[in-house]
Amino acid sequence: MFLKIESIEGIVLSEINYSESSKILNVYTKEHGLIGIMSKGCRSMKSKLRGVSRKLIHGTFHIYYKENGLSTLIGVDVLHSFSNIVMDLEKISYASFLLDLVHQVVKQTDSEEIFDLLRDVLIKIEEGYPPLPLTNILELKLLDYLGVMPSIDECALCGSTKAIVTLSPDQGGYICKNCYQNEPLVSDKTIQMIRMLYYVDVSSITKLEISDEVLKEINHFLDDYYDRFTGLYIKSKDFIKKVNQLTA
C-alpha cells in the first residue's frame, strides 16, 4: 500500500516504548488531530530520531501518514524543545498535566484553536511566566470546548449581571446577591480575574501577576468544577500537588 509523505505541525503528548528500540508517539497535530506515530529505532544511541522522539517536542513532523493506523516518522524540524520546562520540576509537572488534559479533551472534541492554546501556554511557561495561572487559563478555556463552560458573565441561577458576590462550582459559576444562600465566598478580585483569564489572548500576555489568594481560589474552583461537570480525572494533577508540597 502506498503511503504519502506529509509534513504536519504537532506536539508530542505522550510516548510509549515499543519493541527494544522504538517508540509510539501520541502526537497532537493541527491537520489531523491526535495521531499515533511509530518512531522506529529511536531508542538507539545512534538514531537521528532519538532527540526528537519524546514528550513535549513541538515541531514539523515529516511522516508516512496512515489515516487509520500508525504513521511512521521520517524526521522532525523542531520548533520548540521546551528545554527550560524539561529541566524544572515545577514546570514539567504543570506541562505534563496540560498534555494529559488536552489528550483527554481532544478525544471528545477537537479544534485547531485547542492546539494553538496548548502551544501558546507551553511557550509562555518556557519563557518563565508562572505555570499555575497559565494552567488555569487553559483549564478554563477548555471547558468551553467540552460544552460545560461555567457562567462567568452573569449569575448562573437568575442571569443577573449585577451584585455578583461569589463563584460557586456547585451552582455553575457566578452567584448574585439575590440568589446567594450559603455558598463559600471568594474575593472580588477572584470574581474579576476569572473573567480576565478566560478572555485573555495567551500569545499577547506580557505580564501575569496574580496574588496567591486569588490563584488559590480560582484553582480550587476549577478543581471542583472539573470533578463535578467533566468526568475527567487526570492523574498528573496529583503529582503537581506533591511537587507543590515539596517546594512550599
Image (cartoon, grey):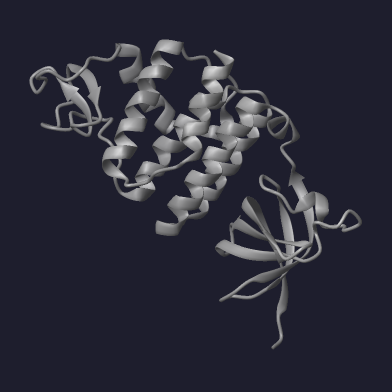
Report whether residue 78 is seen: yes
Query: For this rendering, which residue is in front, 215 or 116?
Result: 215
Identify which residue is drawn at 66% across, 44% down.
56
Identify which residue is drawn at 52% across, 46% down.
100
Would residue 20 be found to the left or right of residue 11 on screen? right
**Could you tell me which quadrant the N terminus lies in?**
bottom right
**Could you tell me which quadrant the C terminus lies in?**
top right
Query: For this rendering, which residue is in front, 5 or 229?
Result: 229
- The residue at the far right in this view is 46
Q: Quadrant of residue 99?
A: top right
Judge whether 128 appears above or below 80 on screen. Answer: above
* Residue 5: percent from left, percent from top: 74, 73
* Residue 19: percent from left, percent from top: 73, 66
Report whether residue 208 is seen: no
Identify which residue is drawn at 21% across, 29% down.
154
Would residue 163 be found to the left or right of residue 74 on screen? left
Would residue 182 be found to the left or right of residue 150 on screen? left
